[in-house]
């Protein structure tokens, strides 16, 4: 399965984006490409709605959202078997449409934008924020500091390995036995 995040090509200047899940051909559902579009309100920059795709299940028993239970029901001396279908939560619920102020849609959009594909929309939309991406000399200074820290750690390790030999046996040997 491949997961891709794309800017909505209908409006290049918006924050709208599409998450695509491409599955290998399978016996459970079609199409192999499942999408969900997140549409933002231009004035508030909040998720206005989401548009999912229609999943066509090859059969009811292949649909993970439908759970079939059989129950035995006593009616007097007779025992009948009753089949009950119920809808259960599933990963595929994500592809349902939602409307404005749906907390699940807002959480999903934030997850895709901020956690899963961190800063990718800003990068591809060319919205550069110096705090997020770093710019100019500040970024170079941070890199130099990081390099210095790595050198210090390496020097300490080298110093320990040259002169600080531990006696054979002792506490380290006890640790090995306990593990």
Image (cartoon, grey):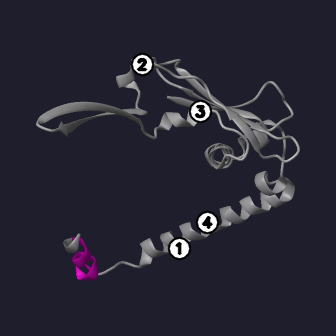
Category of crowding for the residue at label 3, using alpha-carbon neighbours closer than 10 angstroms: few (below 14), some (14–19), many (at least 20): some
Circle nearer the N terminus (1, 2): 2
* Residue sitting at x 68%, y 47%: 106
Element type at mark 4? helix
Residue 143 tag number: none
Element type at mark 1? helix
* Residue sitting at x 75%, y 62%: 142
Which image quadrant is residue 65 in?
A: top left
Which image quadrant is residue 132 in?
A: bottom right
Q: Distance between the residues labelled 2 and 4?
A: 52 Å
Q: How far apart are marks 1 and 2 (CA)?
A: 55 Å
* Farthest front residue in view: 76
Of badges 1 and 2, the one in the foreground is: 2
Q: Distance between the residues labelled 3 and 4?
A: 52 Å
To which residue does mark 3 refer? 96
Circle nearer the N terminus (4, 1): 4
* Residue sitting at x 41%, y 27%: 63
Question: Is 104 drawn above or below residue 171 in the view shown?
Answer: above
Of badges 2 and 4, the one in the foreground is: 2
Q: How far apart are marks 1 and 3 (CA)?
A: 56 Å
To which residue does mark 2 refer? 26
Category of crowding for the residue at label 2, using alpha-carbon neighbours closer than 10 angstroms: few (below 14), some (14–19), many (at least 20): few
To which residue does mark 1 refer? 156
Circle nearer the N terminus (3, 2): 2
Label 3 with label 4: CB-CB less than 8 Å: no
């Amino acid at each position: 399965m491949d997961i891709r995040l794309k800017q909505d090509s209908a409006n290049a200047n918006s924050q709208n984006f599409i998450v695509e899940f491409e599955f290998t051909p399978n016996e459970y559902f079609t199409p192999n490409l499942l999408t969900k579009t997140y549409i933002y309100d231009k004035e508030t920059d909040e998720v206005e709605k989401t548009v999912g795709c229609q999943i066509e299940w090859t059969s009811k028993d292949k649909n993970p959202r439908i759970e079939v239970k059989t129950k035995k029901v006593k009616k007097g001396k007779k025992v009948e078997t009753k089949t009950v279908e119920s809808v259960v939560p599933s990963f595929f619920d994500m592809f349902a449409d939602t409307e404005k102020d749906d907390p699940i849609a807002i959480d999903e959009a934030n997850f895709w934008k901020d956690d899963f594909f961190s800063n990718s929309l800003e990068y591809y939309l060319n919205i550069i924020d110096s705090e997020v991406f770093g710019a100019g000399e500040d970024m170079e200074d941070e890199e130099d500091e990081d390099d210095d820290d790595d050198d210090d750690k390496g020097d300490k390790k080298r110093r320990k390995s040259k002169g600080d030999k531990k006696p054979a046996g002792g506490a380290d040997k006890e640790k090995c036995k306990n593990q």
